[in-house]
Image (cartoon, helix red, strand yellow):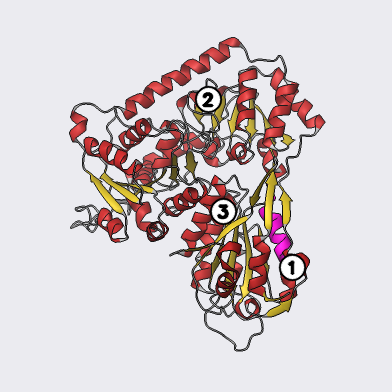
Amino acid sequence: MRLTVAQALVRFLAAQYTERDGRRRRLVAATWGIFGHGNVAGIGQALLECGPEAMPFLQGRNEQAMVHAAVGYARQSGRLSTHAVTTSIGPGATNLVTGAALATINRIPVLLLPGDTFATRPADPVLQQLEVPHAGDVSVNDALRPVSRHFDRITRPEALIPAALQAVRVLTDPVQTGAVTLALPQDVQAEAYDWPEEFFAERVWGVRRPRPDRAELATAADAVRASARPLIVAGGGIRHSAAQASLAALAEATGIPVTVTQAGKGVLPYGHPHDVGGIGHTGTATAAALARDADLVIAAGTRLSDFTTASATLFHNPAVRFIGLNLDPYDAHKLAARPLVADAREALDDLRAALAGHRVPAAYETAYRQEAARWEARVDQAYAVSAPDEELPPTQAQVLGLLDRLVDGSDILVNAAGSLPGDLHKLWRARSADQYHLEYGYSCMGYEIPAAIGVALAAPGRPVWALVGDGTYLMNPTEIVTAVQEGVPIRVVVLDNHGYASIGGLSGAVGGEGFGTAYRFRAPDGTYTGDPLPVDLAANAASLGMAVIRARTVRDLREALAEARSATRPTCVYVQTRTPDTVSGPPPAQAWWDVPVAETATRKAAAQAREEYDRQAAQRRRHL
């Protein structure tokens, strides 16, 4: 069959499927694109030639945002289906880098198809060519190498066959998956070749569920039986493996409490008797206390990031040991853990069987349940709305409280950056396994709106909420136009606090005094401490095509959220929040996070912050 390289690639991708647990899904369900001279005559023409039956097309507005949308779709699809993203060469391609880093760090599959400069070099340099005197084969696309799990450049038509197969192998590998980049020189995209029919045959890629090694399983079971205060830290790997029921069964059978990372929150639903909430810097006091006293930590499907481990200061017990239950050996060995390398569902089921008849001491179970109940009372306090509050602007916690009373298990909340991740991790009551969609591996401002579109495409008919601060909104609102164009009824809740409030608070805590974090006019002394800027984000959202509801008070916001939830078109709820007081605000951080502080400074705030930093850093330990 004689086709161009681009046409062949589209036809190949249309025939690729994943299969796990007997369920088959199309691997690449659609392609996002912005066209320029580097892909308009190649991939662009191929998508037109092959038609939407072979490859549905979605028109984006920003290349980074298109990757975010693909990531949102892929995560909501359990990493079994994703989208491709095509761009021109030059700025279009380099705009992919942030999105690629996010996908790879979060282990989410997405296929990137950037155009590239001519392979045949008809002129030198061509438009948007990066001239590197010591390397003639380098282009701007090489910036994607370190943020891709697999990278290849297709400089000859026949090279597409092994390259495409390798790309799909990585996309469907539960350990290696992430951003996969196939750089496509614009002349090669349009070049014709006689392709073997077998290249376009339907292929089904099985997603593996490896069982644990018997010796590793026995070691893990012995460690649990010997422990008095075991603790499970559940991460995003539980969700990716669809191991929620297996985790619940192990906790119920043994009484071991379960804490969750940002990626793992929701793997046990709100109200489960063994769920003790988020762990780490943004977690609950219950989880922090259990972590400090634990003599055994089962790290299940987590990367054990610094937020989760409180920068290696959280696990205080001198006798603490770790079991690394993870499909990736790299993660399974962190903190000098005893590895249990396997699929999370298979390992949890086998571990439960190996622990038949074993249960934690009754006093331990009673104590942590009581502490979890006390924390829920603190959540109620943060969410509470008094009679005078009804006519005041809401605090951020009250915004979450109003949403908490409105939603059910069908709603999905999308967030990534600012102060919201901390409040959500501590306070939100996830009612379903996929309700809590936090991107916190890269914590990328601007992720929320495009990701919400991807989530909504993967979960049609379900209410999808993008929760954003004003700083995040200004980073990347352009995909609102896409939501309007495609009729995707996302709900965008904009919480305006006139600046980067999260980093402003951190700046104050580490001696930076909030420098450069407020959205305000300059004061006479030259600092940004004047009046708030007259920026109207609600008007901006309306100008991009959204229905907009302005909420001034708690009463307004309650009505606005209810109206947005029932909306059938993209809708924005805009509210200016007030600073919480010590009673109604969310509890402060329950564990440390290492943000280095100036070792020497003349300003009092920095000197005091350094004293606190040295005190906290002294608690760090290396687990060997």
**What is the quadrant of residue 263 in the picture?**
top right
Per the image, the residue denoted by label 2 is: 275
Quadrant showing the C terminus:
top right
- Taking depth in this image into account, of 317 and 401 the one nearest to the observer is 401
Which residue is located at x 50 percent, y 55 percent? 68
Per the image, the residue denoted by label 1 is: 161
* Residue density around tag 1, few if under 14, some if 14–19, many if 20 or more, within 10 Å: some
Could you say where residue 367 lies in the image, as x and y percent from the top left? 52, 14
Residue type, mark 2 in image: Asp
The answer to which of marks 2 and 1 sits earlier in the sequence is 1
Q: Secondary structure at mark 2?
A: strand
Is residue 564 visible in the rendered image? The answer is yes
Per the image, the residue denoted by label 3 is: 103
For the magenta stretch, what is the residue range?
162-174
* Residue density around tag 2, few if under 14, some if 14–19, many if 20 or more, within 10 Å: many
Quadrant showing the N terminus:
bottom right
Could you say where residue 298 lies in the image, as x and y percent from the top left? 64, 29
Q: Is residue 16 above or below residue 606?
A: below
- The answer to whether residue 245 is left or right of residue 582 is right
Could you say where residue 427 lies in the image, as x and y percent from the top left? 41, 31
Q: Disc 3 and disc 2: Cα gap in Å?
A: 28 Å
Q: Disc 2 and disc 1: Cα gap in Å?
A: 48 Å
Q: Is residue 591 above or below residue 465?
A: above
The reply to whether the C-beta atoms of the residues labelled 3 and 1 are less than 8 Å apart is no
Residue type, mark 3 in image: Ala
**What is the quadrant of residue 578 in the picture?**
top left
Which residue is located at x 52 percent, y 74 percent? 90
The answer to which of marks 3 and 2 sits earlier in the sequence is 3
